[in-house]
Amino acid sequence: MTLDKHKLDGIPQITSKTLPREDFETLLGQAGYQLSGSAPAKGRRLKIWWNHSLHRRIESIYSADGQIVITAYHVEGTA
């Protein structure tokens, strides 16, 4: 639960430790990010990648039910 620990390119600093899925995805969409893929993550969580034409790719981790974003950070490479 470290969403507030990472600075994401093109998005104002998030100050909450977690966010509802809808709020997080609205932030990314308004900044021009597009969902590029998903996979299961450790602890029955969900991993989702976001691409942008100018900014680095984001990997986000969601709760097991997919409703809460726990953390998000930049990763290199493609999904």
Image (cartoon, rainbow, N blue to C red):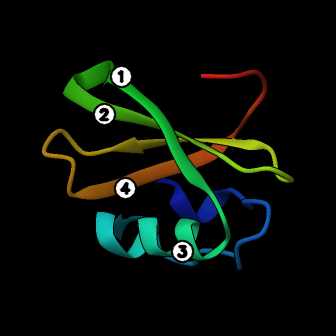
Residue in the picture at 24% in, 45% down:
63
**Which residue sits furthest right?**
54
SS category of the residue bearing label 1: strand
**Mark 3 lies on residue:** 27
Q: What residue type is labelled 2?
A: Leu
**Residue 24, located in which quarter of the rendered image?**
bottom left
**Mark 4 lies on residue:** 69
The foreground one among 36 and 60 is 36
Residue in the picture at 72% in, 50% down:
52
Left or right of 12: which side holds 22? left
Residue in the picture at 31% in, 71% down:
22
Q: Residue 55 carries which label?
A: none
- Closer to the eye: label 1 or 4: 1
Q: What residue type is labelled 3?
A: Leu
**Mark 1 lies on residue:** 39
The foreground one among 22 and 7 is 22
Distance, label 1 to label 2, CA atoms, is 6 Å
Q: In the picture shown, does residue 1 fall above or below 36?
A: below
Q: In the picture shown, does residue 38 fall above or below 61?
A: above
